Image (cartoon, rainbow, N blue to C red):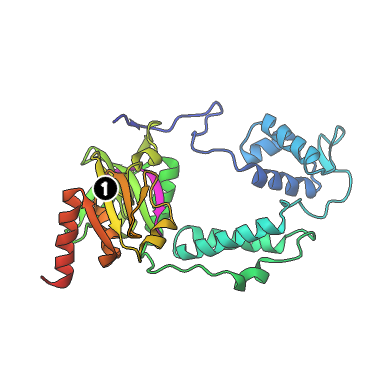
Amino acid sequence: MARTKGRAKKTKRGRPAELKSRPPYARMLQIHDMVQRGNYPNATSLSKKLEVTTKTIHRDIGFMRDRFTLPIEYDALRNGYHYSAPVDSFPMLQIDEGELFALLVAEKVLQQYRGTVFEKQLSTAFRKISESLPDTVSMRLSDWDDALDIRSTGKVNVNEKIFDLLFKSVAKGRQLEILYTKPNAAPEKRIIDPYQIANINNDWYLYAYDHKQDDIRCFVPARMESATITGQKFKRPDSFSLDQYLEGAFGPFSSDESYDIRIQFTKTAAPFIREKKWHPTQKLKELKNGCVEVSLRLSHLTDIRRWVLGWGGQAKVLAPAELLESVRAEAKAVLGK
């Protein structure tokens, strides 16, 4: 697998490529603050302060003038920008009540991930949105707070500092050395290039290139006892796609194998099976006795085995034989036989 190591590339102005420009909205807000002070900043001083080109500053100011209708003008005598009319505050994004409810749903879902790097930033962001809603919105997030509740069983124990480091390493292409403990195994040091963090069925996973295995592996952040930056950088291959990697998966794990799965569900369980699209390859076959048969094509058996066991006596594996035998073995272990 091709990997690129070494120092970060330089931009034309000599800054590392990873020091990207700030998000446009945040940058324009900073321009607004500096213009509002009345010091008549010009494109040159603004570009140095915000670490972007003067061309970018001119484009941002044009956007502020045309799209936000801010009265920002250039004063040739003072060689800088100023507001030609009073500006009370920087325009906020417009939002209607339907979009507000969607934000509430998002906030409720993300509350499940308290203890991660996102918690503080999300809390601050939602508070700012709620406090700055335009007058056209008659309701606030707090008005709908008691109308919606989202719950999940079990909370993943993730070390916040480790999770923060994983997130930053993925974003900046920094190689890591981790101390990783698989279930019922001794801790082991691994050198990884972290490619992508994913939340699958309310659990966090890290997909990374494992130097020891010379392949992409799925890691569980909760199993990492420590993580440190090695000082090496990497470039994630353009060919990597998590969607393609998990194309035949029923959960977080995948392989190069291919299995044709057939499972029959009882008449009692059939309505619940019909309610969801469990997998992109799913096919349902209605049986005369009210039962339903599900057909899937998967690349890994671990996650589908757990799913089948969760249905107890309501599910019967028809194929493949490997899945049937593993389900039988697990069921016997549960019953102590």
Quadrant location, the C terminus: bottom left
Residue marked by disc 1 = 261
Is residue 74 visible in the rendered image? The answer is: yes
Image position of 176 (left or right of 21)? left
Q: Residue furthest left?
A: 337
Image position of 38 (left or right of 204)? right
Q: Residue furthest top?
A: 12
Vertical placement of residue 247 versus 98, above or below? above
Residue 192 covered by magenta stretch:
yes
Give percent across and percent down for residue 71.
85, 43
Q: Quadrant of residue 242?
A: top left
Q: Quadrant of residue 160?
A: bottom left
Which residue type does callout 1 highlight? Ile
Task: Give whichever of 126, 334 is nearer the camera.
Answer: 334
Give percent across and percent down for residue 159.
37, 62
> How many marks do you count on the picture?
1
Give percent across and percent down for residue 237.
37, 32
Category of crowding for the residue at label 1, using alpha-carbon neighbours closer than 10 angstroms: few (below 14), some (14–19), many (at least 20): many
Badge 1 marks a residue whose secondary structure is strand
Is residue 176 visible in the rendered image? The answer is: no
Quadrant location, the N terminus: top left
Q: Residue at x 76, y 61 (%)?
A: 137
Q: Quadrant of residue 49?
A: top right
Give percent across and percent down for residue 84.
88, 43
Q: Residue at x 87, y 51 (%)?
A: 86
Residue 117 covered by magenta stretch:
no
Q: Which residues are magenta?
A: 191-202
Q: Residue at x 77, y 40 (%)?
A: 67
Task: Give whichever of 104, 205 is nearer the camera.
Answer: 104
Image position of 78 (left or right of 91)? right
Majority SS type along the magenta span: strand
